[in-house]
Structure formats: structure tokens, C-alpha cells
Image (cartoon, grey):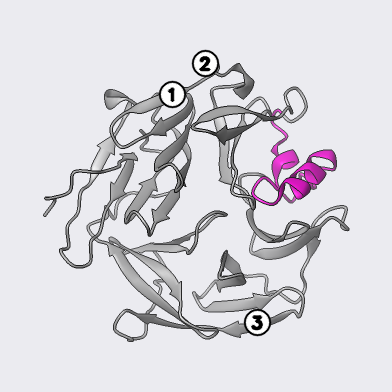
Amino acid sequence: MFTKRLRFFGFIFFTVFLFQPVFSQFQINHFTTENGLPSNGIKGLQWDESTGFLWIATEAGMVRYNGMSFKIFDINSNPELGSNRIVKLETNAEGKILVAGDEGNLSLVKENTISLFYNGGGVTKNNYNYYCAISASDTLLRQCFKNPWPKDIFSIHDNTIVSLYDTACVAKVKGRLYYYSITTAEPVRITAAPSNIKYVFKTSGQLYYLDSINQLFSFDVYLQQYRQQTMEDAEGNPFVIQKENSGLFWQAGMQSPVLIQAGKAWVLEKQNNKLFRFRKIATDIPENTLFNYVQYSKKASYLFLGTASKGI
């Protein structure tokens, strides 16, 4: 089953699955501290399409993987990280890969290395609400840093940020949507949106959400209008998202979300304003593993899956 494929990536209990629709070829790889990773505690994954590198956030520094070897960036080589324990790895609206360290510094992946982006050391330690807008625009990130979002509601760990423009974004927190812009002191609840939102994502310039019973809707923030979407598989049959043991993964920088359920993975592809098609991209995914981080490259046909508990 796993033949004829020489290029590969892996996981930390990080597994990388590869699916080729024509030949059904897979290669699955598993990486831990025994074969090069600095820690089994994974805090995030980001795939850099421009370089073909996978960036891995861990509890013992950042890692760059080129498909053959790991390069580790820690406080010895990069003291600007402030700490080897990484708490967040995100791509923002400008396409920058940003790294938030435990001590509060914010670093930038640039030219295949890491450099200081924003000095928050001594201020934001254990106050990650300063970086709640990390995956929005540079403008909104700096505004959030100067005027942090309320700590009792928002956390860098629990937000999903969807950028609307350089000057505005939407945050999904505890099932609710909030609007944030250069004209708002803090995120404002969007009362027209439901309070049972499980996932939110953006594709083709449009905001979408999945509710608690796994119905898919588009949502226009400014008109405050929503429309239910039809979900089909590749053959045009109705597609059903399971109530349990399923997860929809998307973050800034991903073209489309990925659904993991029943040992398989699908990418959600918009067909028109009313229809999404679920295209299968992988099978044989371990069903007894809780995945926390997912990255998918349509161009390279790579799917990266990582967990926070069974680590690298």
C-alpha cells in the first residue's frame, strides 16, 4: 500500500498522510524525540508553500523540517524566542508565519530562519490575550497588543480568527462570533450570528460556520445574513458530518478546511454559493488518536496531522 513515493513528511505523534486519488498510494511516517524532534509536546504546525518546509512548534523550541532532516531553533541559537516553550504558531492575514513564546516575545519565520518580530517579553508572559489577534493583520495585532482583549472572555488558545480586511476580523469564541476592527476598542458580539457555532472558516473570500448539529452556513458579517449550504461527496451524494468523532480544521493561511472522521480525511471545496463538495484526500488515519493540528497542501498533495499529547 505504501509504495512508489519517495518524498514524505511525518508527524509528532505527528503523522503525515499522503493520498493520490488515481493510484491510492500512501506513505505514513512517525517522528519522535528518538529520530530528531526536540520534544514530544507539539504546539502547532505550519506548512510554508513557498519553501516546501514544515514548521513545527514544540515545548522545546521551533523545528524546520525539509522532508529529510530537522533543524532546531531554540534560545541557544535564537535568544529572541525568549523561551523554548512555544505557545502559538500561526499564519496571519499577510501570510507571515508568527511564533509566540512562553515569555511573551513574538517571532517571525523569514527567509527560512526565525527573527524577533515584536518584543513583548516581561509584559505578556502568561497574558496571551495580548496576542489574541495574532492571525489577523499586523495592524490589528498591534492594536490588540496595546489594548489587550478582555482576559475573562478571550484567550490565544481558544480563538479562531478570520480576517475580513486589514482593518477588521471576526473571532469565534465559545460558540459565538465577535467583530473586531480599528474602530472598536475590543471585540463586539455579533448578535445576528447563532451562539452554537462549532467551527468557522473562510474560503473564496466568504465566511462560513458549522453549527452544533453540523449544518454548514455562509454568513455575511455586514449584511448579517446567513445561508445554509448543501454538502455533497465527490459523486454528488449527500455528505453527512458525524455528530461525534469528527473534527473540522482550518486556520489562517489554509485555502480550505479539512474534515477528519472515521479514519478518513476530506477537503471542503466550494462549488458555488450554495454547494460544498467533500473530496477525500486520505484514509487509514488512526481513529484512536486525537489530532489537534492539521495542515494540507493541495499543490504538494500532503496532509499533515499532529497531536499535542502523543507527541514528537
User: Residue 121, image x and y in percent?
Assistant: 72, 24
Residue found at x 73% / y 27%: 119
Q: Is residue 22 above or below residue 77?
A: below
SS at circle 2: loop
Residues under labels 1 and 3: Cα distance? Answer: 45 Å
Residue 98 vs 253, above or below: the answer is above
Residue 170 counted in the magenta span: no
Q: Seen in the image, is 304 located left or right of residue 165?
A: left
Q: Quadrant of the C terminus?
A: top left
First in residue order: circle 2 vs circle 1: 1
Residue behind mark 3: 226
Q: Does any portion of residue 41 appear in the rendered image?
A: yes
Amino acid type at image mark 3: Tyr
Give the foreground label among 1 and 3: 1
Q: CA distance from mark 3 to mark 2?
A: 49 Å
- Residue indicated by mark 2: 77
Circle 2 crowding by C-alpha within 10 Å: few under 14, some 14–19, many from 20: few
Verify whether residue 133 appears in magenta.
Answer: yes
Q: Do residues under tags 2 and 1 come within 8 Å of each other at their CB atoms?
A: yes
In the image, what residue type sits under mark 1? Ile
Residue pointed to by mark 1: 72
Mark 1: few/some/many CA within 10 Å (<14, 14-19, 20+): some
Q: Is residue 173 visible?
A: no
Question: What amino acid is labelled 2 in the image?
Answer: Ser
**Residue plotted at (55% across, 31% down):** 86
Does 1 appear above or below 145? below
Crowding at label 3, few (<14), some or many (≥20) Cα neighbours within 10 Å?
some
